[in-house]
Image (tube, rainbow, N blue to C red):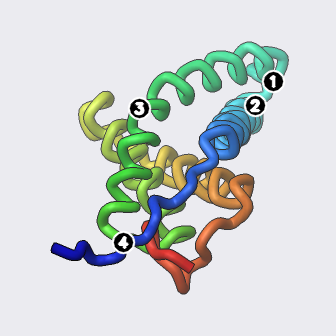
């Protein structure tokens, strides 16, 4: 029996993905500390502390979901770029709504998730732009 030719699995640069994820976490944490400093100038001196808290929370909340969602997007063949921005925006909003019981203040989490997703996609080198999908071979 002759087997059908298959394509080799896509080489995935885990180091680049981790670097992009870390840069995205830093960007979101910076945006959070800037946001709190702009809302209340009395909090401006606490910006470094707010940044560290936001960084720890962002890394804790996004670590495992990021791995799972990248694999989901690859398996489903979703377009890169769009998926990298929209998935974190939706997940951020959903997690915020669950944690806070649906408080309207959680709406700020969607743009933060989108920012993190865009920074991740951009830092990863804008892989597979919108005309290609997760899992497609060149």
Residue 81 vs residue 95, the one in the foreground: 81
Q: Earlier in the sequence, mark 2 or mark 3?
A: 2
As helix, strand or loop, the secondary structure at mark 4 comes to loop
Kindly tell me whether residue 62 is visible in this rendering: yes
- Which mark is on residue 75? none
> Which residue is depicted at the point 68% across and 66% down?
126
Q: Is residue 49 left or right of residue 72?
A: right
Q: Residue furthest bottom?
A: 131
The residue singled out by tag 4 in the image is 6
Nearer to us: label 2 or label 3: 3
The residue singled out by tag 3 in the image is 64
- Determine whether label 1 and label 3 are within 8 Å by CB: no
Q: Earlier in the sequence, mark 2 or mark 1?
A: 2
122 is higher (above) or lower (below) than 51: below
Q: How many marks?
A: 4
The residue singled out by tag 1 in the image is 44
Circle 4 packing at 10 Å, graded few (<14), some (14-19), many (20+), is: few
Nearer to us: label 3 or label 4: 4
């Amino acid at each position: 029996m002759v087997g059908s030719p298959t394509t080799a699995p896509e080489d995935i640069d885990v180091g680049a993905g981790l670097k992009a994820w870390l840069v995205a976490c830093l960007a979101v944490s910076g945006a959070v500390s800037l946001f709190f400093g702009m809302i209340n100038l009395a909090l401006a001196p606490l910006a470094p502390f707010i940044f560290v808290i936001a960084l720890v929370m962002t890394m804790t909340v996004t670590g495992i979901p990021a791995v799972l969602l990248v694999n989901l997007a690859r398996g489903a063949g979703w377009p890169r770029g769009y998926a990298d921005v929209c998935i974190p925006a939706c997940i951020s909003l959903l997690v915020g709504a669950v944690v806070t019981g649906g408080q309207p203040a959680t709406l700020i989490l969607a743009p933060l998730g989108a920012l993190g997703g865009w920074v991740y996609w951009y830092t990863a080198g804008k892989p597979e732009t919108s005309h290609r999908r997760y899992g497609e071979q060149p």
